[in-house]
Every structure is written in structure tokens, then in C-alpha cells.
Image (spheres, coloured by chain):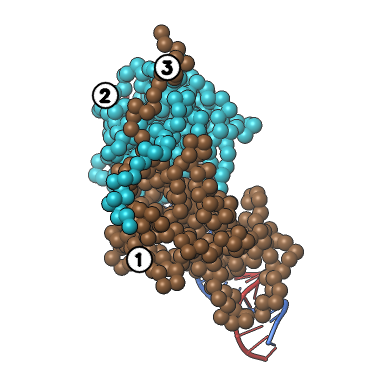
Chain colours: A brown, B cyan, C red, D blue
Amino acid sequence: METEKEFLSAYRLEDYERPSVTADVAAFMIRAGEQTSYRKNPENRLQLLLIKRGGHPFKGMWALPGGFLQPDETIEECALRETFEETNVQPVSIMPVGVFSQPKRDPRGWIISHAFVSVISAESVEQAGCDDADDAQWFDVAFSEAEDGRFLLTLTYADTALRAVLEKVSTRFGRTFFRIADSGGLAFDHAAIIATALTALRRQAKNFDTIFDFLPETFTLTALQKVQETIMNVTVLPANFRRMISSYVEETDEFVRGSGHRPAKLYRRKQSPL
Amino acid sequence: METEKEFLSAYRLEDYERPSVTADVAAFMIRAGEQTSYRKNPENRLQLLLIKRGGHPFKGMWALPGGFLQPDETIEECALRETFEETNVQPVSIMPVGVFSQPKRDPRGWIISHAFVSVISAESVEQAGCDDADDAQWFDVAFSEAEDGRFLLTLTYADTALRAVLEKVSTRFGRTFFRIADSGGLAFDHAAIIATALTALRRQAKNFDTIFDFLPETFTLTALQKVQETIMNVTVLPANFRRMISSYVEETDEFVRGSGHRPAKLYRRKQSPL
DNA sequence: CAAATAGTGTCTCTAAGACAATATCAC
DNA sequence: GTGATATTGTCTTAGAGACACTATTTG
């Protein structure tokens, strides 16, 4: 009778064919726009980090940052590592949004991708000072449903505009994924990954779970509301937002001053919401 | 200048180390218990399919059905294939519940597991007639929080009882995963996978998404309510359940007869809930 | 004071939970 | 009729959305 030890020493995983495994990260940030008047608050834009591919395949096209899983790390650690390598920022939180394993999705061969959303505050990106590489840029994000039921994903940076068209496929369990009708110049199946990531991000923003990660330690309730509105692409009445968020935040003694209007109290996230 | 075609023909994925990739499936079913009186409705039990391992490692221990990803399929197709191979039933729906990629989780080597929940109706299992293999059994499931905040997972079949103890680790995005304190005789990290799968299943059952898959085409509302109560481990007042479910179901003309009490109308799932 | 945002109070409506009451069958 | 489940109606209450109103600052 063979013992477990004997079995393991004779076992060869190499006898089976194996795929390469990657983590790809949709890193989002919210960038404050220009101040149009001395007393008006700035508009916000949701931005996504893309990398210009320097090598084949899809050379010169834009893609999500990502890389191969290493033997000594979990897939989450891989996603965090890749994000850090590209932005110099350690994200507060990442969320898995799906596994993309279509056999022919990568021309290099059998590669399955684990997609993650990560959320980064504009403040930390500025501090890290990694906002100027030619091959890594933050793109403005627009994502909405067209009249024909298809979804339009538009990513813009300076005079570069990527327009992808996607078809929503609803599966069971309230899950949705997207089929690419037009990749809009994005590499691989990354248009579908981005759409899936955005959908997941929006669903999470509903219960105020991710919105804090876009902001510094302390923030005004209006800034927090703007974050949620930017992500969800909706507007809420301030009175109602304040009531809904009240159990998740706590006051500080600080105020924002010099803004041309009534100063806003700064809040911080409450650790135990209930 | 190298063309993309030239690049691809020279590219060798084999130069990088690659993991083996598996899909493991937590297949759930609801089994009707014994009828204690001619007029009382039977109790339900939530059951989970486990396979007794015939070879090393963890020889003789119980594990989730699963297997290696093949080059011509997606990870979802792999999960469906594995479920079908073990039960002879094609599940209506599967849901991914997580990727388990701890480097040392499998003694055979670098193997990352993609966990899925699948939901099967007792009716289809009986029809498939695959309910009698010695090495594949449906275990009764109990999963609840102890006083010390840890979670107790108990799987019982005849005189076999597996008792695992888990610690809940709450991560961001409302996600939770479990650390194994005592595997209770389950192979690999499958105790944690089962706990994660159960948590995901319960969350889905809240919005009536998966509960239909446990039942045949037509069903009584009481049966549907029992399914939800069995999964969620709660009780609801019938009047309130009927109101909540009403937009998801539609009446048929059929009734259940011969039950010793007022006959119940049969319903079927409505395709477009709104 | 004007412009702009910060912040509060309250009305309505919906949906969930509790509970009471009635309906209908097999025996 | 009795025991059991099926089914309907209504009361209460919590929470979301709408809206009106007050407060505070800078130029």
C-alpha cells in the first residue's frame, strides 16, 4: 500500500497541461475638475488607469495593468502588487469581479485572467507622484446604456478617445457580463472586463462600501455625495444623502474654510456602522 | 521591426512557471424529509454533495467534486462538466464564489481552485438515478454561528459526521471569507470553500434568485417558502412571503390534491419579474 | 447684499413585519 | 366536525424620496 508521502513524491503536476494565470486590475480614481468660479465647487470625474502596451500583442493599444501570478502569492496579492507597480499606491481595497477564461481570449496562448477593481484616492496618487508616465494614463470614464439596449463605454484622455460597444448578458444570480461588439481599440477582452468592473463598482457604491476609498481620511459630506453620484451616475437630494450616510460617518471638529460660502464640517468614516 | 505575427510565433508561455487550475463545486439540493403524519407537510433538509477521495492526498476523506480546467473550456464550463460527471444532472445555474489561491493549499503543488455554487432540484437528482454510489453522498448541512463568534459547519450522512470550525474574516466590499480552525475531516481547504459558498447562497436567496432552482417547474408557494427558510435558516410569516414573492411567480390552473388539507395552487416562475 | 453651499425639519409613499380572520380539503 | 394547511386583509412601522426652509461664509 502506497503512503501519502510516497504518492506525493511520485506525483507530477507537469503531466497535465496548465494555463498561465494573470490578474488584471481596473484601478479607479476620482479627479476633481477645474474650479469655474471662486465660489463654485469643482466637478468630479471618474478615471481609470490604462497602460499603453509597449510590446506585442496589441502593441500600442491601451490595456488594463496586470501581470502573471507568481508561485508565492495569492491572486489578490498579485492584483495588489500589479496595482502598486503601476501607481506606486497601495490600494485600500480590491474586489474580485470575475474570471475571464475564454480559450481564445489571448493570442499568446492559454491565459486566464482574474479581474479586480481597486479604488484609489486622488490624494494618494498625487503624493505618490506617478501621474506623468507616457505609457500610463488616467482616462475619464463614461458608461451608459444606448437606446438600442447596448452599452457604450467611452474612455478619454487628452485627444485619445476609446469607444467600446458592449452587449449585456444577464446570467443567473443577479450577475451580468458583457460581450464585446466593438473593442474600441482596447487590448484583449479588456473592454468587457472594464464594463464588468464598473457594474460591480456601482453595485457596491449603493451601500456606501467603496466610496470612502476615493477620499482622504477626512472629507465633507458633499464631497462624499459627489463621489457616489459620480460613480453611480445619478443625483440624490443632499438632505436624503445625509440621512442615509449618517450611520457610517462621524463628525470631526474641523471645518473647510475660505470657500466663498458656508464652511462645511469635516467627517471621517465610522468604524462600526451599527 | 518585429511584426505581431513574428512575435507570437517566437513567444513561449512555457518560459514562465504556471499553476494548475481547478474548479470545485458545492452542489446543493433540498431533500424532503419523512412525512410524520398523513396531513402534515414534510420537513426539508439542505444537502451538499461530497466525494470520498479514492486516492492520495487526503485519501478516504470527503471533498467537494471538482477537477482540472481543460484548454478548450471556460472555468464555468469546467464547473458544469464536473457537476454533471458526479450527479448526471446539468445544473440550471452556477455562481462563482471565490478563487482560492493560497500557495500551500494543496500538497500536490501549485494548484489554484475556483469555487462555484450549483443548485439542483431533488426531482432531477432522483430522475438521474445517481444517488447510490458509495463514494458520492449527499450530506445534511448545518451552518451557524457559535457563542464565541466562530462558525460551526456540520455535515452529516448516516453515521458519518464532519464538524468543521471556521473563523469569519470580513473583508471590504461586503465580502467575507473563512479561515479554517478545524477542518473536521474535510480534504484540502474545502471547509472554507463550503462556508463561503453557503454564505453566498444565503445572500442570493434573499432576493429570490436561486430558490426556484431547487424545485420542479411548478411548485406551491409553501414549498418555495420552505426552500427559502431552509437555506436562510430563518422563518417568515406566510402572508408576508406571499406578498414579497408575488411579482416573481405566476399562477397555473393546477392544484395539489390529496394532502389532507386545503389544496394548494401550483405556481411557476415568471420570466420577467417587472 | 448676493451667490453659493451647508444643514435641518417634515410630509408622503412604499414595503416589510405582525397578526387576525376566513377557506378548503381528507379523514 | 377536526386537524392541518392555504389564502386574504389590515394595522403598524421604518426608510426612501421630495421639498421647503434656515444658516453661514466671501466678495
Query: Which numbered disc, 2 or 1, marks the residue closer to the eye?
Result: 1
**Chain on which label 3 sits:** A
Indicate which disc, 1 or 3, sits on the residue closer to the N terminus.
3
Point 48% across, 64% down: residue: A134
Residue designated by label 3: A7
Let me know if marks 1 and 3 both belong to one chain. yes
Closer to us: B272 or A102: A102
Label 2: which residue?
B129
* Circle 3: residue type: Phe
* Disc 2 from disc 3: Cα separation: 34 Å
Q: Position of residue B35 (x, y in %)?
A: 37, 24
Query: At 35% from the left edge and 41% from the top edge, which residue is drawn?
Result: B12
Left or right, A166 with reference to A70:
left
- In which image quadrant can residue B145 be found? top right
- Give the residue type that dot 1 points to: Arg
Pair 2/3: label in front = 3
**Distance of mark 1 from mark 3, alpha carbons?**
54 Å
Quick check: can you spot residue A97? no
SS category of the residue bearing label 3: helix
Q: Quick check: do tags 2 and 1 share a chain?
A: no
Give coordinates of residue A51: x percent, y percent.
44, 58
Residue pointed to by mark 1: A163
In the image, A219 versus A183, the foreground residue is A183
**Residue furthest right in the image:** A253
